[in-house]
Image (spheres, coloured by chain):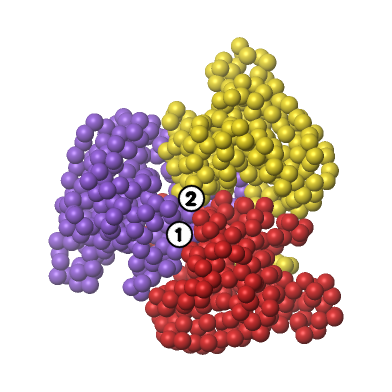
Chain colours: A yellow, B purple, C red
Amino acid sequence: MINLEKNDNVFTLTMDDGENRWNTTFVREISKILDEVEASTGAAALVTQSSSPKFFSNGLDLDWVNAPAEHPAAGDYRVFGGEFMALMGRVITLPIPTVCAINGHAFGAGFMFALCHDVRLMREDRGFICANEMQIGLTIPNPELALFRHKLPANTFFETVQLAKRWGGPQALQAGIVQQTTDIDNLAASAFQRAQELAPLGANRANYGGQKERLFGENAILNNSHGAAYHLKHASEQGH
Amino acid sequence: MINLEKNDNVFTLTMDDGENRWNTTFVREISKILDEVEASTGAAALVTQSSSPKFFSNGLDLDWVNAPAEHPAAGDYRVFGGEFMALMGRVITLPIPTVCAINGHAFGAGFMFALCHDVRLMREDRGFICANEMQIGLTIPNPELALFRHKLPANTFFETVQLAKRWGGPQALQAGIVQQTTDIDNLAASAFQRAQELAPLGANRANYGGQKERLFGENAILNNSHGAAYHLKHASEQGH
Amino acid sequence: MINLEKNDNVFTLTMDDGENRWNTTFVREISKILDEVEASTGAAALVTQSSSPKFFSNGLDLDWVNAPAEHPAAGDYRVFGGEFMALMGRVITLPIPTVCAINGHAFGAGFMFALCHDVRLMREDRGFICANEMQIGLTIPNPELALFRHKLPANTFFETVQLAKRWGGPQALQAGIVQQTTDIDNLAASAFQRAQELAPLGANRANYGGQKERLFGENAILNNSHGAAYHLKHASEQGH
């Protein structure tokens, strides 16, 4: 379902489950792979990719969502929401650089997973990124809204969550959702190369992961009620 | 002063008052039109446009502001500030998709009105969007600053409110203030078409309008003191 | 070390200390110059530039940081952090328009100084802007994170602070870090011209500086727990 390889300092996680739809079993398989990645030490980076020719990850496992009892292998439905969100919270604060190779459609939960990485590369000619909840009549949970808002510019954020916009590669690049586009033949190699470049940042995991916690975690400095000038002017009182 | 038409699922509000400057009467006329729009049910979207060849809306009715007693038809000056801001708060959370066709200058209050819509199209060859308060020595009220900040990327926001930058169509597109530009002959048709595409999102008004309240309303999740990772990791406790 | 000229309404501050690295003496020299600038009245703007052919400002004075006792002329190391941050807080809220001409590398503290200005022009063919702390294993203090976040779009912010990205002129323009690029021969003249255009905004210093305090200071409206719609709808209660 999920494969992991390591070459030089780069772990490559490959989702190998067709449309790579999310259920409790899928969440736990990814989580186990991350345990292995996090057990490493020293310079390292993670590439996440899909083996599908068409999908990065096409969202929730809707067959299971609609009839959990008929798909017992997909796992306990009642714990899914909390476990999936917590996994996303783990990925966004992973203490090594993370690179996501978006080879095809990334919808809903698949978009969230991509966005939790530090860098995104996307195939330029095909595939869409989309948070389609509003279009299919679902409510976007608060933690998902917070994720989109903290990763995207204000205008891109609004078009994404309110208008359910489908972003192709070039538009996603322009909008600040992905950082690079490439043809499909060079996608995996480009992601690997970017991960190799960034891997040294992962050598000091306390610093690299600690900053992600400061950006995105409890009482995040960026959400403090005071502005930048206040923090700058009172830095000596705060011990900086 | 304000006209309303409906074709298919699209309401078209046309400001037909010359420079479309804002006074209490103008606010209340728009508000009455919105009552009619909101009384509808089912899939729907709103296009806002101007009948002027040169102006979308050129800001406050300064003749009236400077001598309210001489312009009694413009309405009660004392209630204007609160009623205008509240109308903007209503537009930004309108429970159907809203598309603004900026055919010419949109200054001050006119810029605010445009920005409260979900999507903006702008004539590409002429006309400027500008929050010119700083240039003419006026203080920008806090609710207006909040509006600009929650709709624009940080750099665009700062140039807009602090430097009173005049944005032409192509620059406004690049800066994320408008989502499309077109020649004037195709502006109305393009806005109508975009509204038709978005109208289905308005069918579920509780979801569409409710999310705008969550983004922009009281105790907005996005302004919470915690970051995205915190919300993700604690989603199960929050009932998601 | 630091020179100040005035032509028409434009003050030009020139850093003339080689790589223009930051120590306590450098902070205090800049601060003295700002006293002179702030003692002026009427329309005014500030241009900040460097006399070096290669560096705008290359960051902390590392020789001094590593052996303060051997460089007594660089000043008291113990007060540096608080005084430097407070100076940045002063620059970001300076009550006149400020224009920064980035002629070469701006690293770490040099990037912060540039970002505290209202407008940035950058040489297009050479030089990098970079917050390189993560790369060299240093922790970015909270006030610096707040500065970057309040000035840059969310995606640019993250690449800057987490990935220590080196931004050349054209990329910095695209990312919203600088507002204009030019060849080196026209950089000083372009910065001066931009400052002349903006100088009238400095005539009303209470309004121009006051708004910067509202954007970036204590209990900044933008960081309030409520969203824009809440502020708009409750404007009349807030006295707007």
Work out whether residue B66 or residue C196 is closer to the camera in this orientation and state it: C196
Given the image, what chain letter belongs to the residue carrying mark 2?
A: A
Residue B104 in sight here: yes
**Which amino acid is tagged 2?**
Ala
Q: Name the residue at 60% across, 58% down.
A: C167
**Which amino acid is tagged 1?**
Phe
- In the depicted structure, whether residue A71 falls above or below residue A238: above
Judged left or right of residue B45, residue A138 is right
Work out whether residue C188 or residue C27 is closer to the camera in this orientation and state it: C188
- Location of residue B57 (image quadrant): bottom left
Given the image, what chain letter belongs to the residue carrying mark 1?
A: B
Q: Position of residue C25 (x, y in %)?
A: 71, 82
Q: Position of residue A181 (x, y in %)?
A: 56, 41
Judged left or right of residue C134, residue B151 is left
Work out whether residue A140 or residue C50 is closer to the camera in this orientation and state it: C50
Q: Which residue is mark 2?
A: A154
Secondary structure of the residue carrying tag 2 is helix
- In the depicted structure, whether residue A80 falls above or below residue C236: above
Q: Which residue is mark 1?
A: B157
* Disc on res. B21: none
